[in-house]
Image (spheres, helix red, strand yellow):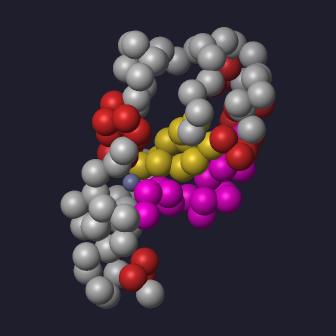
Amino acid sequence: MARNRYYLTPHWRSLKRACHERDHWMCTVKGCQTPTYRLTCDHIETRPNVDHPTELDVLGNLRTLCLHHDAQVREQASGERRRQGKFINKGSRADGTPIDPGHPWSK
Ligand SMILES: [Zn+2]
């Protein structure tokens, strides 16, 4: 979806920062080990493409994703999410638990 002017506003910038701080600047896909310096803030429920804050622009509707996982579920021009919003993670089982028993998420 094309960027719109909302993403330039202080409202969005502060919300995005709060989201990343809540998520400890890490991708929220369980077991993801992608480096943390390439993050995006994803709306779980897609916001309308308008340039003002909406009821969907709240911390509870946001999650931190790495660019890899963001690309997996990014909305298409049709508005549908790729892969029906499901993530692929080669290092984990279908339920998200890591295959590697030494991974911190295994504990
Ligand atoms: Zn990730």
Q: Identify the residue at image location x=50%, y=57%.
A: 28
Percent coordinates x, y for residue 60 in the rendering: 71, 46
Query: What's the residue at 35%, 81% (across, down)?
Result: 103
Query: Along the horizontal axis of the image, is 22 left or right of 43?
Result: right
Q: Where is residue 18 in the image (x, y as percent from the top left)?
A: 71, 50
Q: Where is residue 68 in the image (x, y as percent from the top left)?
A: 33, 45
Residue numbers of the magenta segment: 15-30
Q: In which quarter of the image is residue 59?
A: top right
Q: In which quarter of the image is ligand 1?
A: bottom left
The reply to whether the magenta stretch includes residue 5 is no
Q: From the viewer's perspective, tell me whether residue 67 is left or right of residue 13.
A: left
**Residue at image location 44% in from the left, 87% down from the top:** 107
| Residue 16 among magenta residues | yes
Q: Can residue 71 be seen in this view?
A: no
Q: Which residue lies furthest to the left in this view?
A: 90
Q: In this view, does 94 lie above or below 16?
A: below
17 or 103: which is nearer to us?
103
Q: In terms of image quadrants, where is residue 90?
A: bottom left
84 over 36 or under it: above or below: above
Q: Position of residue 32 (x, y in %)?
A: 37, 62
Q: Which of the two residues, 53 or 61, is positioned nearer the viewer here?
A: 61
How many marks do you count on the picture? 0
Q: Which of 34 and 79 is in front in this view?
A: 79
Relative to 91, 15 lies left or right: right
Residue 46 visible in this rendered orientation of the protein? yes
